[in-house]
Image: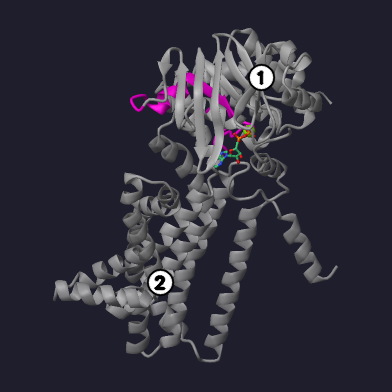
Amino acid sequence: MITVQNVHKWFGDLHVLKGVSLQVNKGDALVVIGPSGSGKSTLLRCINLLVQPDEGDVIIDGVKVNDPRIRPEWVRQQVGMVFQSFNLFTHLNALENVMIGLRKVKRMDRAGAEQMARFELERVGLADKADAYPAQLSGGQQQRVAIARALALNPKAVLFDEPTSALDPEFIREVLDVMTKLAEEGMTMVVVTHEMGFAHNVADRVLFMADGVVVEEGTPDEVFDRPQKERTQAFVGKILG
Amino acid sequence: MGLKAAAKEIWTRLEDRPVLRSAIAIGGLLGLGLALVLGLAAVGIVSLRFLADNATFLAVPALTSLSATLLSFAIGFAGAIPMGLVRAFAPRILRGEGWRRAAFAPLYGAVTSYVEAIRGTPAFVQIFLVAQVSGLIFPGNPNIPFWGGTLALTINTLGYQTEVFRAGFQSVGQSQVEAAKSIGMRPVQVFLHITLPQGLRLITLPLVNEWVGLFKASALLAYVAVPELLWAASYLGNNRSHPIEAFIMVSSVYLAIIVPLSKAVGWWERKHRIPGLGVAERTVGVGRRRAVVAAGTPAGGLD
Ligand SMILES: Nc1ncnc2c1ncn2[C@@H]1O[C@H](COP(=O)(O)OP(=O)(O)O)[C@@H](O)[C@H]1O
Ligand SMILES: [Mg+2]
């Protein structure tokens, strides 16, 4: 479903991704871990072309998407994204946040878009918050609306960039529950997170990144319980406390 | 309880009745003005008779002032959106390379010089210059003072509104733009559906200020023979030897237009306020504070 081949990215002189490759099969969840600044966010952004890779290929559902002939807007409809700080549109209420992509990008009529948006809010358990503005919602509720907004466009895969690390502890559970349900329903996901419980239960594969390279990859058991590389052992030891 | 304390008590109780509060404030102001005029009349400085006789004299000049202001403000508004965009976002393009940079460098330079030229010279000088030039191009045309004056005001407000829009566009967070891109919006859609509506919310107050400033600056058109409010008041004062009355009248007209307008916009803004965006709530804004904290969370997180 998603293949990343030998991707490099420079920001000026800073070599952020140094030949990253990965593969996510349809319906699988890949969890990416790694220290701050190792290039995890940049990697996700390369997949939906918010960042243009300098070298290498990103292939989604058999289509090489980092190609001048492919519109990045089209790619971003195929691959949804959920941000660390939610990034809900502050001037729109929850329902409008979910609707706007359907209306403006998918060009649906108002009634159809509204019906679908309400359905998506229902799926994340927020049917009763349709009229609330982002500032009136808790962090956990905002992030669930953000997930509904991404899902409304019916993407083939969803990227999550540390979706719970800006949340107060009491709101983490509700967001992880929504994500777990999504994985069980067969959504293809790439999740940057350090929630070990989630990674253990949900991930099909775990990938450890450091300094812009993939250090180690394997099943959750392999990476967390029997890491082969020294750097992985040190990092996993730290996050497992 | 003393009178002062009682008044203060009532004022506090009206905390969440902003319309009533404004009405009382305006009423008080009117009363004071009226008392002042009556006082001046009592000692023979002001003639009430003259005020009554010429009460409607300023109606048409007021329309002239309003037309010049509304027209130039609207045209300036339309022009300031693209120019504000250039001011706000060209610097980022200029940091890149390629044809975009080559195309935007002169554009950015031109818009910036324009803004600096307008902000760095007196409005009066700008008006005089435009009036002289348009008089030269269309000699003897009786409509030229008005259109030349309106053009001068347009040129002036375009410069100021460009900067208002620049600030508005720049204060829309990059994360909002990124979220819009991530759901597949094209750059034009991001601008129309995210940056513009959010930016407008943030600049309502500065835009009203600009309108009020422009309306007052339109008085300068009196000096290039536009028959607007100040021109009419001078005429009235000089020709009929009642300058004080004339200037009391013209001040009242300006006040009668400006105060209700800014009150009405403030009221509209509060009525349609979106929590966490633009004007603050009158009471303590818990939701607002939360939104700011959320948006300010640094990337990277816990590692
Ligand atoms: N747009 C950008 N411009 C310049 N440097 C960037 C940009 N985005 C990320 N970086 C840098 O790239 C490195 C990797 O960042 P990031 O991908 O956010 O890492 P992570 O998500 O793993 O913490 C960091 O040093 C960061 O400062
Ligand atoms: Mg990151």
Name the residue nearer the viewer: A197 or B262: A197
Q: In this view, does A105 lie to the left or right of A97?
A: left
Residue range highlighted in magenta: A68-96
Mark 2 beta carbon near ligand 1 (under 8 Å): no
B181 w.r.t. B261: above or below: above
Q: Is residue B31 visible?
A: yes
Query: Measuring 62% from the left and 41% from the top, which residue is drawn there?
Result: B275
- Mark 2 surroundings: few (<14), some (14-19) or many (≥20) residues within 10 A: some
Quadrant of the snapshot with the N terminus of chain B: bottom right
Q: Where is residue B230 in the image (x, y as percent from the top left)?
A: 37, 77
Q: Which chain carries label 1?
A: A
- Mark 1 surroundings: few (<14), some (14-19) or many (≥20) residues within 10 A: some
* Image-quarter location of ligand 2: top right
**Residue A231 location, quadrant:** top right
Quadrant of the snapshot with the C terminus of chain B: top right
Q: Position of residue B117 (x, y in %)?
A: 37, 69
- Colouring style: one colour
User: What residue sits right under mark 2 in the picture?
Assistant: B217
Mark in the foreground, 2 or 1: 1
- Is label 2 in a helix, a strand or a loop? helix
A13 w.r.t. B259: above or below: above
Q: Where is residue B93 in the image (x, y as percent from the top left)?
A: 41, 47
Residue type, numbered disc 2 = Ala
Q: Which mark is residue B292?
A: none
Name the residue nearer the viewer: B205 or B104: B104
Residue type, numbered disc 1 = Glu
Q: In this view, does A154 lie to the left or right of A241?
A: left
Q: Residue A216 carries which label?
A: 1
A139 w.r.t. B214: above or below: above
